Amino acid sequence: MFSNCQKITFVDIAPNGLKKIKREFPNSHCVLSRAEKLTLLSDDSYDLYVSLRTYNSSFFDIKKAISEANRVLKSNAGIIISIANGFLDSTRNCIIPGLLIPGTNFVDVYRGIDMAKKLSTYFVTMGFKEIQILPTNIEIYLSAISM
């Protein structure tokens, strides 16, 4: 997926995850940081921002993370964010649509799409254009273009 990238940066809060990435992609730039605080990344310097399932975290400032993504993206750059929309129930060996409410056993089938709508509202507020939502059985993808 990333083999044709001349310059790629990975950001994660997990040092071990970044070590694995560095072994797999030795020419990549790895940054230990939270998505809400990308201070080591320059303004207007990236063509694409991809975040997979980061925005599902309960301990995450979504507005600040999108603001940081917007700051580091060049004009007319892309952003792709995925949100979980289901999970594997290993006891029944099947995919359960929806997401668990933190601290409960209750599955909310609308939680993923509600989060996607919330994110798209933040995209609008921060000036992104061409906002799209693509739901699948286990993931919802949002994409947009920076201004």
Image: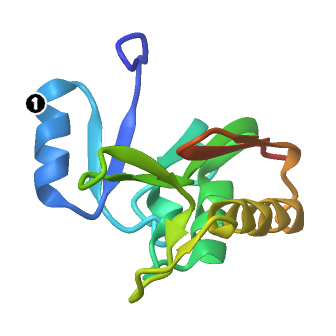
Colour pattern of the rendering: rainbow
Quarter of the image with the N terminus in it: top left
In the picture, measured across the screen, residue 120 lies left or right of residue 44, that is: right
Vertical comparison of 73 with 83: above or below: above
Residue at left 53%, top 45%? Answer: 138
Residue type at numbered disc 1: Arg
The residue closer to the viewer here, 93 or 19, is 93
Residue at left 11%, top 44%? Answer: 19
Vertical comparison of 32 with 26: above or below: below
Q: Residue furthest bottom?
A: 103
In the picture, measured across the screen, residue 123 lies left or right of residue 20, that is: right
> Which residue is identified by label 1?
23
Q: Position of residue 126 (x, y in %)?
A: 82, 64
Q: Position of residue 40 (x, y in %)?
A: 39, 60
Q: Position of residue 6 (x, y in %)?
A: 41, 17
Q: Position of residue 103 (x, y in %)?
A: 39, 89
The residue closer to the viewer here, 28 or 120, is 120
